[in-house]
């Protein structure tokens, strides 16, 4: 068996950084010192200020608000990044850089992503907008209810190709950089994880005899 290195990134942080809430986000920035970057004003003036921040399904018109609809006052939203599902039916745009980035090694992320870990970057909800939803392809899944419906926090994917796109939390979106289109395929520094969480659940080598 090859030797397993505990942290190939050499930057594992414990303590505060390991406390990024999960699954997804009890994401009040006031409670989390790692989200120190200022939240940009992208022009959204709707009510409530941050859509669906109470969680659950209290906001039936969520499709008329960020991150699913955009009608800002002024023109402050500058699309810096674009993400899209594999088949291209669903496309989102993102303003500015992520507030933080993480790798999550929990069993739930492994299972839902079909991958050894989840890589996610955090944006304020009001910095995200849906620009394409062909054939009504948005799909929502609540791990709490174990049902396919918009119940915040929930997981957002494409109903056609099933690509995971992001987790919608109460205040932020945890987007998956795997769906982003980067210039020259170079991943920006702001997408580097500052933390590995649920590190004890990471994929391990298979013991002898299995
Ligand atoms: Zn798709
Ligand atoms: Zn996880």
Image (tube, rainbow, N blue to C red):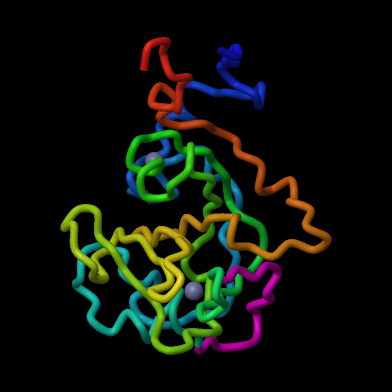
Tally the numbered discs: 0
Residue 47, horizontal then vertical, whole percent: 35, 80
Q: Which residue is drawn at 74% across and 62% down?
A: 182
Which is more toward the observer, 185 or 52?
Answer: 185
Which corner quadrant of the image does residue 195 belong to?
top right
Residue numbers of the magenta segment: 71-84
171 relative to 4, above or below: below
* Residue beneath the point at 50% across and 62% down: 124
Give the residue at x 45% y 84%. 69
Q: 96 above or below 31?
A: below
- Residue at image point 54% right, 45% down: 119
Residue 156, percent from left and from top? 39, 66
Residue 36 within the magenta-colored segment of the rendering? no
Q: Quadrant of the C terminus?
A: top left
* Residue 81 lies within the magenta run: yes
Q: Which of 178 and 191 is in front in this view?
A: 178
Q: In which quarter of the image is the N terminus?
A: top right
Task: Using residue 158 as the reference point, say whether residue 55 is left or right of it.
Answer: left
């Amino acid at each position: 068996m090859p030797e397993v290195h505990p942290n190939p990134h050499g930057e594992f942080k414990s303590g505060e950084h390991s406390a990024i809430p999960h699954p997804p986000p009890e994401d009040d920035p006031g409670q989390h010192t790692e989200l120190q970057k200022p939240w940009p004003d992208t022009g959204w003036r709707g009510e409530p200020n941050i859509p669906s921040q109470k969680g659950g399904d209290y906001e039936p018109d969520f499709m008329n608000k960020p991150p699913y609809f955009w009608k800002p006052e002024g023109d402050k939203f500058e699309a810096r990044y674009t993400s899209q599902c594999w088949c291209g039916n669903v496309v989102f745009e993102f303003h500015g850089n992520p507030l933080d980035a993480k790798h999550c090694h929990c069993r739930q992320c492994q299972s839902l992503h079909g991958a050894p870990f989840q890589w996610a970057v955090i944006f304020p909800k009001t910095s995200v907008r849906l620009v394409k939803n062909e054939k009504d392809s948005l799909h929502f899944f609540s791990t709490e209810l174990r049902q396919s419906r918009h119940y915040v926090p929930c997981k957002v994917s494409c109903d056609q190709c099933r690509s995971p796109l992001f987790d919608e939390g109460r205040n932020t979106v945890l987007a998956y950089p795997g769906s982003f289109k980067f210039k020259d395929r170079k991943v920006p520094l702001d997408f580097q994880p500052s933390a590995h969480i649920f590190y004890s659940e990471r994929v391990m080598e298979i013991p002898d005899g299995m």
